[in-house]
Amino acid sequence: MKVVGRAPPYTIQFLYKNTKYERRNMRYSRMLIPTTKEVPADAEITSHRLMIRAGLIRKLASGTYTYLPLGWRSLLKIIEIVRKEMDRTGAQEILMPSVQPIELWQKTGRNVDYGETLAKFEDRHKRWNVLSPTAEEVVTNIAVNEIKSYKQLPINLYQISFKFRDEFRPRFGVIRSREFIMKDAYSFDADPAGLDKSYKAMYDAYCRIFKRCGLRYVIVEAEVGEMGGSGSHQFTVPCESGEDTIVYTEDGSYAANLERADVDPLPKDNGRRLAGTPVVPVEVPPMQEVHTPNIGSIESVCAFLKTQPKDMIKTLIFSSEGDTIAALVRGDHELNTEKLTQTIGGGHVELADETIIEKVTRAKVGFAGPMVIAQKVPKMIIDHAVAAMAVGVTGANKTDYHVKNVVPGRDFPLEGDNIIVTDIRYAQEGDTYNGKKLLFKKGIEVGQVFKLGTKYSTKLGAKFLDETGNEKPCLMGCYGIGINRIMASAIELGNDKDGIIWPISIAPFEVIVTCVNQEETNVAQTAEKIYRQLLDKGIDVLLDNRDVRAGVKFKDADLIGIPVRVTVGQKSLAEGNVEIKLRSEPKSQKVTVEKARSKIIELISSLKEQLKV
Ligand code: ATP
Ligand code: MG
């Protein structure tokens, strides 16, 4: 078989690394490109719908997808860009097992901390295994065995492989799927300055990767979550369909994701309700119990007591590593578990079960209040905004009762060994940070970088001998990119009513040659000639040689979104011309058959130029 063209993008299995592809694969008539008008009901967002309609993916089961030829070609190109940029930083590619013994995960406690998202199974020898959602444990284990001396540091190991996460709600097609491809890298350093350097190298590589993939992105401060560690940034593509919320100030001085975003404490409410009235702190009468039978939710209590959520105090009871923790937030605010977790110094935090709540409050769930229980729990975390309230309503620690006239500091303590007043809520409209108004935008997280520090190396024993012969734990960083999310985000950003508009770097093909009249020998031969010329130049070209109406070909070309279309049709050809059109531009231009190749090459390089780093 004659092979032509340049090497294709690498596959993750390395099978085709540096081999050449065959010409016959690039004829539409022979390819599996099942474009369709039908979109399933669960395809809520544009990229999901277009990926199905353009025949890039097909769903197998909830959160699992098959990538058909066009989808896979795009993924391979993304992988190639990611791999090149990772290699450029000196990181070394490896491949770790997807199935990992649970014992390793037990050592870090993440068999529990990861929660139900971690998929586990028992093998025939009754051993439990984890389906890797990420690989800190395994890579640290490599370091435990292979890194002995500071001379081997720094080192950065990365892989591009399948990850499995049993997401609670897989959705948005490949954006939140259960099985997906991630590039995950792990750096090991001898000291904090080294870690800073490794982190910066990854941060910069991510900027280059996303630029080369044609994405517009923002970088925000992020919460470390169950990953642990001291700092993190998230790379997010702003778009309406994103599940993440970016919080930022207009002047760009602050940008964080919603989990991380700090808020200024609210000013102390001294009870003056009307602006301009004299400063007279309101004397609040003593607390008063009110019967609120079967009324538990904030809304129903407010309706019943004719008050507002902002005047309510929510008392939430959590369990963390065997301790019971009370957390207070205002009724109109939402508690941020990430902030709560950070406040209590990490570990796994979850809402306490009914038995614990009933034991602490001596009431049914829904009637907890901070009075009395402040003395009972080892920790009570109070949000700034609650401490700033003049007076509020809360649960009475008595089934079917609430209390009015609750004054923070008078009726429950704002100080004490077990009391912390801090920021534990999500930012919301109207909040400020550093005195500046916070703004909110939706986005898709495509990548995240973390400074892990010694969390994993200490727990698993990844130590090295420093220059003076002292044993020290390695300082680690970890860095993830969602390959599939890059593809979906690019489609979210690049589309119109007719279909996808790919950035050329990750398009399944760079050029499509549309042969309008396949039955006309002259037309078919010219299309074939241009197609071969482009192939020989190493261009990724698809020849639409199908026996279908021209209208169908144009529609499909627009739908699958190949950046450059060359139309070879009888009419233009009679004048010696073909038509060249960019998918992103409305107008086409006529070029003589002889000049077609050089014109196409020129267009491709100008499209590529825009994505250069
Ligand atoms: P999310 O907050 O969206 O659940 P995450 O922060 O848990 O993601 P990381 O552990 O940071 O994800 O994983 C690294 C990258 O892997 C993410 O930035 C994202 O691009 C990708 N990713 C994570 N979960 C999924 C998923 N369920 N489907 C597809 N890609 C994912
Ligand atoms: Mg993340």
Image (cartoon, rainbow, N blue to C red):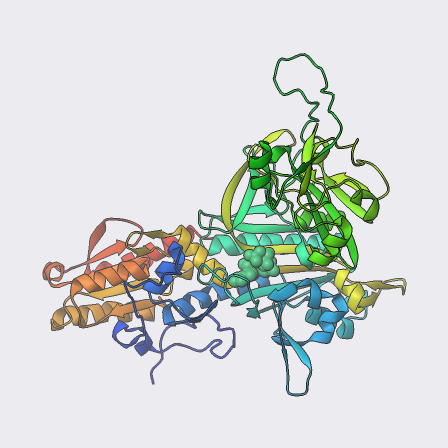
Can residue 369 be seen in the rendering of this structure?
yes
Image coords of residue 380 (percent x, y):
78, 44
Looking at the image, which is closer to me, 24 or 164?
Answer: 164
In which quadrant of the rendered view does residue 348 lie?
Answer: bottom right
Exactly how many numbered labels are in the figure? 0
Looking at the image, which is closer to me, 145 or 175?
Answer: 175
Image coords of residue 374 (percent x, y):
80, 43
* Left or right side of 187 for 596: left
Residue 571 to residue 428: above or below:
below
Give the residue drawn at x 35%, y 59%.
50
Can residue 480 be seen in the rendering of this structure?
no
Image coords of residue 133 (percent x, y):
61, 67
Looking at the image, which is closer to me, 86 or 369?
Answer: 369
Residue 435 to residue 174: above or below:
above
Give the residue drawn at x 77%, y 51%.
360
Please, which residue is most extreme toward the bottom here? 125
Image coords of residue 530 (percent x, y):
24, 67
> Which corner quadrant of the figure contains ligand 1?
bottom right
In which quadrant of the rendered view does residue 423 lie?
Answer: top right
Looking at the image, which is closer to me, 158 or 151?
Answer: 158
